[in-house]
C-alpha cells in the first residue's frame, strides 16, 4: 500500500514539474535561453523514472509477469524477451511520454488560440469600412 502512495505522490510531483516547465516556457522572454524550462522538464522525467524505480515491485513487475503469462509461448525465452520489451516501452512511454504530451497539448492549444486571434482580426479588418 505504501508503494502505491509513493507512486501517486511521485507521479503528482512529476506532473507538477511538467506544468511548471510549460508555464515557464510561456513566460520566457527572447533574452532567456530556456535553460530553466529544460531543467524543469528533465526533473519531471527524473521524478517519473524514480517513481517507477521505487515502486517497481507493484507497478512494473506485475505487468511483466502478466505479459509473460498472457503471451502465446508460455515459458520460452522469446516470450520473456517480448514481455520485457513491451514492459520497457510502457515504462518509457510513462517516463518520457507524459511530460512531452503535456507540453505538446499546451503548445497546440496556444497555437489554436493565436490562430483564432489572427482570424478574428482578419475578419474585423474585412468588415471595417474602407476609407
Image (cartoon, rainbow, N blue to C red):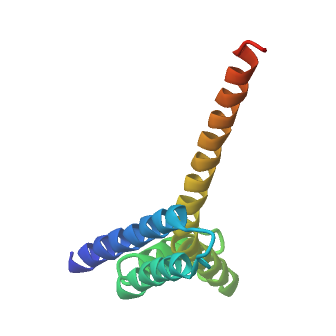
Does residue 64 appear left or right of residue 85 in this picture? left
The spot of residue 38 in percent (x, y) is 56, 79
Q: Residue at x 54, y 66 (%)?
A: 25
Q: Quadrant of residue 96?
A: bottom right
**Location of residue 130 in the rendering, given as x and y in whole percent from the top left corner:** 78, 14
The quarter in which the N terminus is drawn is: bottom left
Where is 9 relative to 43, above or below? above
* Name of the residue lying farthest toward the right: 131
Looking at the image, residue 98 sits to the left or right of residue 126; the answer is left
65 or 89, nearer to the observer: 89
Q: Identify which residue, 57 or 31, lies in the foreground.
A: 31
Q: Position of residue 103 (x, y in %)?
A: 56, 62
Q: Residue at x 37, y 68 (%)?
A: 16
Report x, y in % for residue 74.
60, 76
Q: Is residue 70 above or below residue 43?
A: above
Residue 77 visible in this rendered orientation of the protein: yes
Q: Residue furthest left?
A: 2
Residue at position x 59%, y 41% in the image: 113
Inspect this view and state whether residue 74 appears: no
Mark count? 0
Residue at far front of view: 131
On-image quarter of the C terminus = top right
Which residue does the image show at 36% across and 84% down from the upper left?
57
Amino acid at each position: 500500500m505504501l508503494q502505491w502512495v509513493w507512486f501517486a505522490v511521485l507521479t503528482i510531483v512529476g506532473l507538477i514539474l511538467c506544468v511548471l516547465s510549460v508555464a515557464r516556457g510561456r513566460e520566457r522572454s527572447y533574452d532567456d535561453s530556456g535553460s530553466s524550462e529544460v531543467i524543469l522538464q528533465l526533473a519531471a522525467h527524473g521524478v517519473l523514472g524514480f517513481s517507477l524505480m521505487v515502486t517497481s515491485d507493484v507497478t512494473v513487475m506485475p505487468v511483466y509477469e502478466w505479459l509473460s503469462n498472457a503471451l502465446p509461448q508460455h515459458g520460452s525465452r522469446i516470450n520473456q524477451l517480448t514481455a520485457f520489451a513491451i514492459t520497457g516501452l510502457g515504462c518509457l512511454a510513462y517516463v518520457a511520454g507524459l511530460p512531452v504530451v503535456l507540453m505538446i497539448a499546451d503548445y497546440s492549444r496556444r497555437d489554436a488560440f493565436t490562430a483564432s486571434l489572427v482570424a478574428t482580426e482578419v475578419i474585423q479588418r474585412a468588415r471595417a469600412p474602407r476609407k
